[in-house]
Image (cartoon, rainbow, N blue to C red):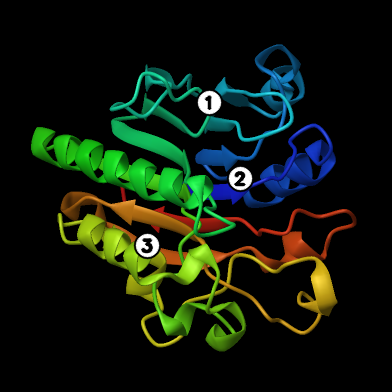
């Protein structure tokens, strides 16, 4: 089983890129972030023509998350992260697919900081940690995949000192990510590439993609039973070379199941 996460950065604008990647890589499950489209405008039909059924939570202009499944219909269990009924940002969707519970996550960026956006990021992270603990307690096989907007360690960014004031690298944010892992989740990319975890994001500015000045922001976290089935993990860098590409590339895992 091949599962991927991809911040598509506008699913309608980059639909051709998405379709090309799906046709080439044929993942079984895909978590998308930053759809940037309202629910009724989500391009379900062309994806179905490729054999992918979708569940999504859209939002005009910003945010938006989806789960695609090849040859199966995702059974939605949640369309929002619990813990704050006033939060209407489309950042979390959860569904059962072929015996695995999958969440697509778009954690807040948090910039600029200090300020309300950074406070929202930390509060959202706490809600995710609490919900992840509940999922772990069920004993179900779970994958938490998405754009976490967290650079976990200094090895996950090309030049940490250039980003030292950014919300992505702050000690509070990294500590929250570690507390999530401490529940028993495995960071699949880090586990498969412990010495040099692959970048998943390259900013559009200052030729950072051609110069390979990247960051690792997109993570797939696995419960222990799925971690035992982890056979491979990587990033489809070629997608970032496409014309009008997203600033992220798809990250993926392969499970022996």
Mark 3 vs mark 1: which is more N-terminal? Answer: 1
Residue denoted by label 2: 26
Is residue 221 toward the left or the right of residue 204 in the image?
Answer: left
Measuring from the top left, give residue 91's x and y in whole percent. Answer: 50, 34
Q: Which image quadrant for residue 102?
A: top left
Are the residues tagged 2 and 1 within 8 Å (C-beta)? no
Does dot 1 land on a helix, a strand or a loop? loop
Q: Nearer the viewer, mark 3 or mark 2?
A: 3
Q: Residue at label 3? A: 173
Residue 39 is labelled as none
Secondary structure type for disc 2:
loop
Q: Nearer the viewer, residue 37 or 219?
A: 37
| Depth order, front residue of 108/254 | 108
Q: Taking 132 as reference, is 75 above or below it?
A: above
- The structure residue drawn at horizontal position 53% and vertical position 28%, both measured from the top left corner, is 89
Position of 115 relative to 54 (above/below): below
Q: Is residue 210 left or right of residue 44?
A: right
Residue 255 placement (x, y as % from top left): 35, 53
- The alpha-carbon separation of the residues under discs 3 and 1 comes to 37 Å
Q: Is residue 90 left or right of residue 127?
A: right
Residue 57 figure quarter: top right
Q: Residue at x 15, y 35 (%)?
A: 134
């Amino acid at each position: 089983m091949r599962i991927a996460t991809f911040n598509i950065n506008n699913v309608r604008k980059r639909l051709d890129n998405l379709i090309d990647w799906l046709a080439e890589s044929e993942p079984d499950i895909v978590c998308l972030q930053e759809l940037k489209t309202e629910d009724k405008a989500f391009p379900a039909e062309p994806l179905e023509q490729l054999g992918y059924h979708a569940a999504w939570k859209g939002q005009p202009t910003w945010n938006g998350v989806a789960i695609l499944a090849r040859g199966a219909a995702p059974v939605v269990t949640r369309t929002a992260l619990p813990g704050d009924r006033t939060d209407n940002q489309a950042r979390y969707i959860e569904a059962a697919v072929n015996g695995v519970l999958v969440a697509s996550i778009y954690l807040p960026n948090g910039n600029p900081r200090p300020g309300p956006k950074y406070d929202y990021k930390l509060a959202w992270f706490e809600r995710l940690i609490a919900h992840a603990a509940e999922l772990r307690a069920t004993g179900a096989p779970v994958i938490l995949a998405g754009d976490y907007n967290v650079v976990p360690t200094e090895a996950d960014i090309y030049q940490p000192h250039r980003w030292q004031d950014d919300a992505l690298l702050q000690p509070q944010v990294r500590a929250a990510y570690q507390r999530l892992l401490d529940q028993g989740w495995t960071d699949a990319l880090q586990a498969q590439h412990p010495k040099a975890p692959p970048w998943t994001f390259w900013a559009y500015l200052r030729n950072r993609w051609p110069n390979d000045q990247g960051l690792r922001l997109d993570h797939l976290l696995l419960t222990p039973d799925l971690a035992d089935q982890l056979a491979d993990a990587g990033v489809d860098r070629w997608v970032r070379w496409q014309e009008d590409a997203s600033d992220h590339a798809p990250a993926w895992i392969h499970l022996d199941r």
